[in-house]
Amino acid sequence: MKGFKLTFLLLAALLAQPVWAGIAVVVGKDTVVPQVSEEDLRSLFKGQRNTLGGTRFNLLDMPEGSALRDSFYVKLLNKHAAQMRSYRARMIFTGKGAPPRAVSGVPEMKVLLHSGDRPYIGYMDSNQVTPDLRVLIELN
């Protein structure tokens, strides 16, 4: 009976974990962006740069504690949430950068990506990308 309970608990834990086909880094469909590499995105999300092709981009981030946010940083920067908080705290303290703007979720991110008042770059589960968005890169 103990073996069955353990197997059941392991299976339940695996099923509770979010599974994404991929994470898409996106902009609004009409946003002019030069060709972007994964290295360019690493530099942007690390705060080492804020421009692409001469255009300043504002970064959007999922809420703190979001599983998608954690997965994004592991896939892009190979850093966990606690490591990113520490890194960003140092950047802010030294005046070398500011964190991306946190949104409440994908609906708010989509609104900002389409706002047109300034160019934003965000990310979401690739299954949530709609035709009014343009995928810059997909992280698997």
Image (cartoon, grey):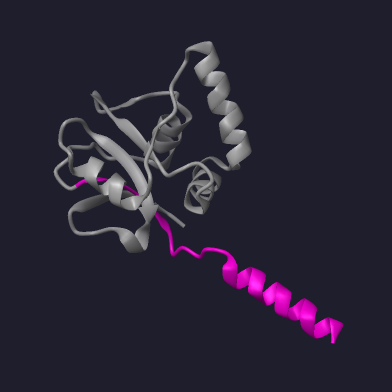
Residue positioned 36% across, 59% down in the render:
126
Residue at the bottom extreme of this rendering? 1
Residue 100 magenta-drawn?
Answer: no
Residue at the front extreme of this rendering? 104
Residue positioned 85% across, 82% down in the render:
2
* Vertical placement of residue 37 versus 107, above or below: above
Left or right of 106? Residue 31 is left
| Nearer the observer, 37 or 10 | 10
Residue 6 magenta-drawn?
Answer: yes
* Location of residue 63 by image quarter: top left
* The N terminus sits in image quarter: bottom right
Residue positioned 22% across, 37% down in the render:
33
Left or right of 134? Residue 100 is right
Residue 24 visible in this rendered orientation of the protein: no
Numbered range of the magenta stretch: 1-28
Residue 103, position as x, y percentages in the image:
37, 41
Residue at the top extreme of this rendering? 94
* Vertical placement of residue 9 versus 108, above or below: below
Residue positioned 44% across, 19% down in the render:
97
Count of numbered tags: 0
Residue 12, position as x, y percentages in the image:
65, 74
Residue 107, position as x, y percentages in the image:
29, 51
Left or right of 140? Residue 5 is right
* Location of residue 79 by image quarter: top right
Residue 66 visible in this rendered orientation of the protein: yes
Residue 82, position as x, y percentages in the image:
62, 37
| Nearer the observer, 130 or 105 | 105
